């Protein structure tokens, strides 16, 4: 199927309450423009240099999401262009984003990445660490929700359990009634191989790449 056909198929399948992030990492601008021509406006990238280059060269109405591990020395490549950063996985990164955003006169929309998988290679906060954050400390950050990646496994029960735990964490944070969490309303979970389970477990954002653009190219 063509990129346009895949976008249209996903648009018909996904509930209106779920935002599709087309993961375009490693893909050429031509592929992104094919998805754009099909009406897709939200794209996700995970490498700062590629993210900045695409944001500068592609249509300005694209909503860019940064979905990869972010090093603090790469903030200048990401924050000027990111509508949402999915992968805030440490207090150090959170503090540096807050500081950088303040210096540039903007507020950065972010998701807190939770470690929900039974894989040590995955990044992220524990649930307890997220619940212990002093949200009022960060004046230049807007906490929009949580993000997580389930274990890469064929065991659907395990994947469902991990997504369920992320939704429970989201609910627990939502129950903290402070102004800094007034826009905390997003759960980013689910990729090409498990997005249907994620949607069933309450995802509001899914990150889909290979189902749209085909197998990943590494360049």
Image (spheres, rainbow, N blue to C red):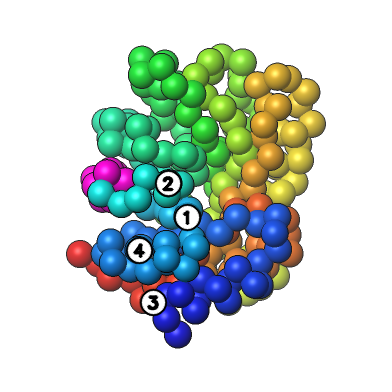
Between label 1 and label 3, give the one nearer the viewer: 1
In the image, taking residue 7 as reference, residue 127 lies left or right, namely: right
SS at circle 2:
loop
The x, y position of residue 162, in whole percent, is 65, 57
In the image: residue 50, left or right of residue 106: left
Residue range of the region highlighted in magenta in the rendering:
47-56
Mark 1 / mark 4, whichever is N-terminal? 4
Which residue has dot 3 on it?
214
Q: Residue furthest bottom?
A: 1
Numbered mark located on residue 61 in the image = 2
Q: Which residue is mark 4?
A: 33
Residue plotted at (28% across, 70% down): 217
Tag 1 and tag 2, C-beta contact below 8 Å: yes
Question: Could you tell me how far apart the alpha carbons at marks 1 and 2 are, in whole angstroms?
Answer: 7 Å
Vertical placement of 33 versus 101: above or below? below
Q: Is residue 95 magenta?
A: no
Q: Dot 1, crowdedness within 10 Å: few (<14), some or many (≥20)?
A: some
* Residue 63 placement (x, y as % from top left): 45, 47
Q: Main secondary structure of the magenta part?
A: helix
Residues at marks 2 and 4 touching, judged by CB atoms closer than 8 Å: no
Q: Nearer the viewer, residue 40 or 144?
A: 40
């Amino acid at each position: 199927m063509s990129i346009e056909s895949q976008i249209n198929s996903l648009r018909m399948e996904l509930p209106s309450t779920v935002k599709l992030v087309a993961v375009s990492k490693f893909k050429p601008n031509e592929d992104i423009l094919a998805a754009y021509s099909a009406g897709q406006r939200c794209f996700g990238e995970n490498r700062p240099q590629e993210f900045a280059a695409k944001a500068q060269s592609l249509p300005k109405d694209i909503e860019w999401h940064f979905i990869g591990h972010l090093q603090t020395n790469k903030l200048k490549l990401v924050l000027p262009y990111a509508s949402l950063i999915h992968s805030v996985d440490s207090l150090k990164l959170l503090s540096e984003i807050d500081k950088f955003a303040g210096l540039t006169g903007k507020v950065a929309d972010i998701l807190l990445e939770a470690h929900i998988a039974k894989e040590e290679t995955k990044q992220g906060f524990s649930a307890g660490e997220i619940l212990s954050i002093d949200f009022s400390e960060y004046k230049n950050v807007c906490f929009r929700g949580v993000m997580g990646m389930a274990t890469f496994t064929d065991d659907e029960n395990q994947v469902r359990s991990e997504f369920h735990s992320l939704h429970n964490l989201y609910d627990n944070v939502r129950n903290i009634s402070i102004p800094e969490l007034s826009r905390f309303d997003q759960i980013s979970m689910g990729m090409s191989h498990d997005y249907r389970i994620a949607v069933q477990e309450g995802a509001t954002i899914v990150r889909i790449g290979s189902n749209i653009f085909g197998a990943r190219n590494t360049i």
